[in-house]
Image (cartoon, rainbow, N blue to C red):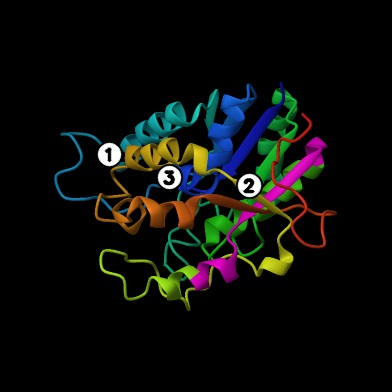
Amino acid sequence: MATLVTFHAHPDDECIGTGGVMRKAHEEGHRVVLVVATRGELGEIPPGLLADGETLTERRVKETQASADILGVDRVEFLPYTDSGMAGDSTNDDEGTFWTADVEKAARQLADILVEENADVLTCYDDNGGYGHPDHIQVHRVGMRAGELAGTPRVYQNTQNRDEFRKRAEAFADREGVDLPSPDFEIGKPEEELTGAVDVRDHLTHKRKAMRAHASQISEESFFLSLPDEVFAEAFGVEWFIRAGQGPGITETDIMAGL
């Protein structure tokens, strides 16, 4: 048995980016640990969702645990930072936000968990955080440094295949009932930069159920949940990674291989 630690910026990021590999690792008998940098305090609040006296922060923590249970997570930890908001928001530089965190200090906090867990594999994000969100960029910086401090053997940058995304977006642009982002949406990395592609189609039922657990942020009308099953499988059936020293090209199809 090995240990996989996945590091994410906000509640719900875990199931969207790495829900498949997390469930896959669990089903293969590995230990799965989820670390989240913030509690998503600045997420949107759908009218009437919160119970009397309940805060969005409390709800998102509960949703994270529910998602984690679905994905087979053994331990959930939150770092002591707050949501920075989208790029350019006035909240980015507020005291206590993850964007303003000292990278070395935050990396040590994550590294302590990696050492405690004797982690074999760590996932974070690519250097643009997937799509430019400040907290996601910081996950890359903190995650990569934490892997160095802890001496974690395998560190993967979770990302998207930009070329495949654009092909799908263009192919389904005029299809009724399919509302994918524009092909011009700047996401992920070109395929030539990717080194890992994990087929998680066997775990999409759990991945989508975990998305539904985040009801405060992922509604049934969102493109995540409104896509027809076959389109969802095309869009989310492979999870993409970059690992330094691998390649050129995609050379790995299982981030837990051999462990």
Of residues 126 and 99, the one drawn nearer to the viewer in this rendering: 126
Q: Dot 2 surroundings within 10 Å: few (below 14), some, or many (20 or more)?
A: some
**Residue under label 2:** 198
Q: Would residue 49 be visible to someone looking at this image?
A: yes
Residue 154 position, x and y percent, is 78, 41
Q: Would residue 102 be visible to someone looking at this image?
A: no
Specify the segment rendered in magenta: 149-167
**Residue under label 3:** 12
Residue at far right of view? 245
Of residues 146 and 241, the one drawn nearer to the viewer in this rendering: 241
Point 67% across, 49% down: residue:
142
Q: Any mark on residue 143, and which?
A: none
**Residue under label 1:** 55
Spatial CA span between label 3 and label 1:
17 Å
Instruction: Inspect the image, locate mark 2, and give the three-letter code of the amino acid beneath it.
Output: Val
Spatial CA span between label 1 and label 2:
36 Å
Quadrant for residue 54, please give it: top left
Would residue 160 be counted in the magenta stretch? Answer: yes
Figure quadrant of the C terminus: top right
